[in-house]
Image (cartoon, helix red, strand yellow):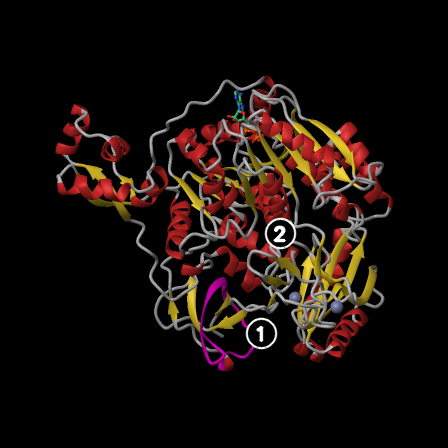
Amino acid sequence: MPAVLRVALPVPLPTLFDYLPASAGRADVGSRVLVPFGKGKAVGVVVEADVESAVGNARLKRVLKVLDDGPLLDAELMATLARAADYWLGAPGEAYANALPLALREDRPLPDLREEAWALTAAGQSALDAGSRRGGSRALLEALARGPVTAALLHELLPGWRDAARRLDEAGLIERTEISGAAPAPTSTPPELMPEQRQAVDTIAESLGQFQSFLLDGVTGSGKTEVYLALIEQVVAQGKQALLLVPEIGLAPQTVRRVRDRLGVAVEVLHSNLAEGDRARAWLRARSGEAKVILGTRSAVFTPLPHAGLIVVDEEHDGAYKQQEGFRYHARDLALLRARALDVPVVLGSATPSLESLANVQAGRYHALHLRARPGAIRAPQVRIVDMRAQRLEHGLSPALLAAVADTVARGEQALVFRNRRGYAPVLLCHACGWHAECPRCEHPMTLHAGRRQLICHHCDYTARLPAQCPACAAPDLKPQGQGTERLEEALAAQFPDVPVLRIDRETTRRRDAFEQLLESLHEDRPAILVGTQMLAKGHDLPNLTLVAIVGVDEGLHSVDFRASERLSQLVVQVAGRAGRARKPGRVLLQTHHPDHPLLRQLLAQGYAAAAATLLEERRSVQLPPYGHQVLLRAEAHQREHVDAFLADAAGALAGAPLQLAGPMPAPMPLRAGRHRGQLLIEAETRSALHTALRPWYRMLSTLPTARRVRWSLDVDPIDLY
Ligand code: ADP
Ligand code: ZN
Ligand code: ZN
């Protein structure tokens, strides 16, 4: 019987597919193939070659075309992806699809790695030496002084460079060429490391060349990034590659610049906002070993690293590392799998480590390194609670808070008012009859966006015009309840007419680069007030920011989600860390109706580590993660009965297994975008008990007749239960 190829196809099914080899061309494990699938064709990845098929060969179809001469995904990635699909109970085909940039999931030739670049001509070199040009032309000549630079990099280094390029090209001073990747010369020199930084670097460096997990626990501004850079320098000097993951690139342009300025090697940046061709090129340059440093968001964890030396996960506690649809992997945990497979150290950095990572330190699996000093800063900011009870509030802002903002701006400094809710008000209410605006598809209050004169559902994006009067009783006075960033912006602008008030949230930063441009419009030496959501919790140094006022954290104290208190603590500490990053001391105000809440008290009196230790003990006592393990089965359908029937079958199939089941039950949001939602939470004390029972169950679920009438998904180690 001739051997067959086992292929992973990008479909949400727990299976691989067998095909007869193509009539021409040999397909290796890790190569892409074009195969007939259903009524059309699909591009898949060969997972096994030369296997015997369980199905009779007569019924098998033949591979149409082999797309790669050799494996596109190397043995390590193939093995790690197989383990990942097994761990996250994901469709193997979706795991492989996640690993490939979109442009490589199609039947097209690999993109050309060469791209547009510009170089000095001999005349250009003379002009540069003679110093005969000024302004933008001079800057461009200087940028090209050490060799050709790609257009992409010029966009970054010299926005608006095209005009100068046209002039210099016409004058014969520069010429267009094509190169593959570019390594600009380093322009910054490393600072002398502080003793704690030095020790962290030395300890981690001892592990280069072998697997070891480190938790780099250092307050904001303590110099974690300098530790990464020092290590990456060593790795690159050994001719190896480093992967640096960050939660959101839009918030990290300063980090990108710092890495480029420091290292003088080819740095590829990988994130979802890149054009598909650029993303594929960056991925392929990593695969060829040409890219020495890869800096990227979640999906960059799948970058090939043939000469791997180090993996760093910055802000490891950040929820953005968890993919919330399709293949629901966690990039931090996948980074650990990869580091182990590649036999390199992995460094998880955070000012507010996740309880999972702290538990791993306790269990001796991670080596913890601490940075307690803040180089350059005078001292850690002082944090004070503002008791809101029995206060006259001005659009939700207490007199104490307004007074603090007033004297901050009076001193010429900047204040940040943090509120994690965008829009004008979360509820629009009729005082005459009690009607409130509700999303018809979610049965949840809609948020009032006053500037756009719209009501928007933050759960499904359903949008409605702002009614002029109450739709129920025709009363004219509809009242916004509560405050979002838009309302705070308005209130602060009214209170402080002479100071610029800048709102930073998803609405004001929709355009690419808008976030950075907004922040750059702030003059370092001028007073200003920033209002914003958690986008402001990270990124961009604001040296003149000396007051951080946190409003509206109380929701986090009463949430049903057991992770809410961990998230609240992280957010408060991260936002507070924005104050006083430079020479000036900072202040933090936390406005709450619950000044005596034990979590807030401990957080402020003893800091994050102590609060996290308490939270961990609570988790341990009730066997919640990281001490117990969870898998969540979600299902949704237009008809509730379909959800109920599927979940009942799914739960029934687990009868007798050594697991705890919660549900089937309605999801915390039982209706969203017109679909009824339900869930089944499965818990066990050990991971192996969970996986042993759930592996065959997962494969069985898609064969259930009731599964056809619902959308369902499995979430291993869910980070929220919605
Ligand atoms: P983190 O990543 O922990 O927030 P950074 O590495 O960004 O901290 O450092 C915070 C600030 O302190 C930066 O401006 C950085 O340049 C500076 N810095 C870090 N380490 C040192 C050092 N050893 N000496 C002087 N300045 C430092
Ligand atoms: Zn009414
Ligand atoms: Zn909705």
Residues 657 and 406: in front is 406
Please tell me whether residue 277 is drawn above or below residue 159 in the rendered image.
below
Dot 1 amino acid type? Ala
Residue 155 place in picture, x, y as percent = 34, 43
Query: Can residue 38 be found in the magenta stretch?
Result: yes
Q: Badge 1, how many Cα within 10 Å: few under 14, some, many 20+?
A: few
Q: Quadrant of the C terminus?
A: bottom right
Q: Give the secondary structure at mark 2.
A: loop
Dot 2 amino acid type? Arg
Residue 353 in sight from this viewpoint: no
Q: Badge 2, how many Cα within 10 Å: few under 14, some, many 20+?
A: many
In magenta, the rendered stretch is: 36-58
Residue 38 place in picture, x, y as percent = 50, 79
Q: Give the secondary structure at mark 1.
A: loop
Residue 686 place in picture, x, y as percent = 78, 51
Q: Earlier in the sequence, mark 1 or mark 2?
A: 1
Residue 306 in sight from this viewpoint: yes
Residues 539 and 652: in front is 539
Which residue is outermost to the right? Answer: 621
Instruction: Give residue 542's mark.
Output: none
Residues 53 and 146: in front is 146
Q: State which image quarter holds ligand 3.
A: bottom right
Residue 498 appears in which quarter of the rendering?
top right
Marks 1, 2: nearer the viewer: 2
Identify the residue shown where x is 42% and y is 50%. 283
Residue 697 appears in which quarter of the rendering?
bottom right
Q: Which residue corresponds to mark 2? A: 422
Please tell me whether residue 191 is drawn above or below residue 359 in the rendered image.
above
Q: Which residue corresponds to mark 1? A: 54
